Image (spheres, rainbow, N blue to C red):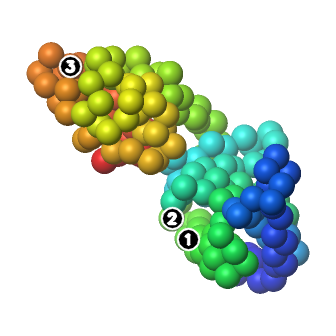
């Protein structure tokens, strides 16, 4: 087991004092930098910066970052949720470390999915069929994991087949498929 002990600190986001959402910071007693390339290989939607020794990704509407002595998670309701989510992240790190013999580590630095890149592949008709006021709003929601590509009915028309295939490939690379 790589992580055996940690302490959790909760903070209100500094840019939003009085917020009802919290960020949790788990201070680790062990340097876990050796597991980061294995996590990077396992979490295809993650952004890994080997030089800075930080791995970030989004899951369940939360941003998660893992550094050598810290796991940080944003968008939490309270301490109980923070403890549960941090424990899940610690378990993921420990499980990945235990399975490292079967995982090819990766130092690849993936680029984050950008709303503008997604938008360029949408029909651009602002038809509102997806439930959003504009295609760009839909792209923003899609990148944030708050919308499903299947909601864009026009995209699944034959005329948009090439753009749809490009977009589906882009989403799959970022592990954000439908």
Nearest the viewer among 98 and 67 is 67
For the residues bearing labels 2 and 1, Cβ distance under 8 angstroms: yes
113 lies above or below 123 = below
**Is residue 97 among what the camera can see?**
no
What residue do we see at 65% from left, 59% from top? 75
Q: In this view, does 3 lie above or below 137?
A: below
Look at 71% across and 64% down and name the residue there: 20
Across and down, in percent, residue 142 comes to 43, 39
Where residue 91 sits, quadrant-wise, is bottom right
> Which badge, 1 or 3, is on the more N-terminal residue?
1
* Residue indicated by mark 1: 99
x%, y% of residue 9?
Answer: 84, 72
Task: Describe the element under mark 3 as helix, strand or loop.
Answer: helix
Most foreground residue, 31 or 115: 115
Look at mark 2 in the image and give the residue it sits on.
102
- In this picture, residue 82 sits left or right of residue 161: right
Residue pictured at 73% horizontal, 78% vertical: 79
Nearer the observer, 112 or 31: 112
Q: Residue 43: x percent and y percent?
A: 53, 54
Q: Is mark 1 on a helix, strand or loop?
A: loop
List the residue tagged with mark 3.
160
- Work out which quarter of the rendered image holds the N terminus and state it: bottom right
């Amino acid at each position: 087991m790589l992580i055996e002990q940690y302490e959790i600190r909760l903070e209100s986001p500094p840019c939003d004092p009085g917020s009802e959402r919290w960020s949790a910071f788990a201070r680790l007693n062990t340097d876990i930098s050796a597991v980061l390339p294995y996590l990077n290989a396992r979490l295809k939607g993650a952004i890994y910066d080997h030089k800075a020794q930080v791995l970030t990704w989004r899951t369940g509407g939360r941003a998660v970052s893992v550094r050598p002595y810290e796991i940080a998670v944003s968008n939490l309701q309270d301490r109980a949720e923070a403890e549960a989510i941090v424990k899940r992240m610690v378990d993921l790190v420990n499980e990945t470390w235990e399975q490292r013999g079967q995982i090819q580590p990766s130092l690849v630095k993936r680029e984050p999915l950008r709303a503008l890149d997604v938008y360029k592949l949408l029909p651009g008709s602002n038809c509102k069929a997806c439930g959003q006021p504009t295609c760009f709003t839909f792209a923003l929601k899609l990148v944030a994991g708050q919308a499903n590509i299947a909601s864009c009915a026009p995209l699944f028309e034959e005329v948009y087949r090439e753009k749809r295939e490009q977009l589906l490939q882009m989403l799959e690379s970022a592990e954000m498929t439908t």
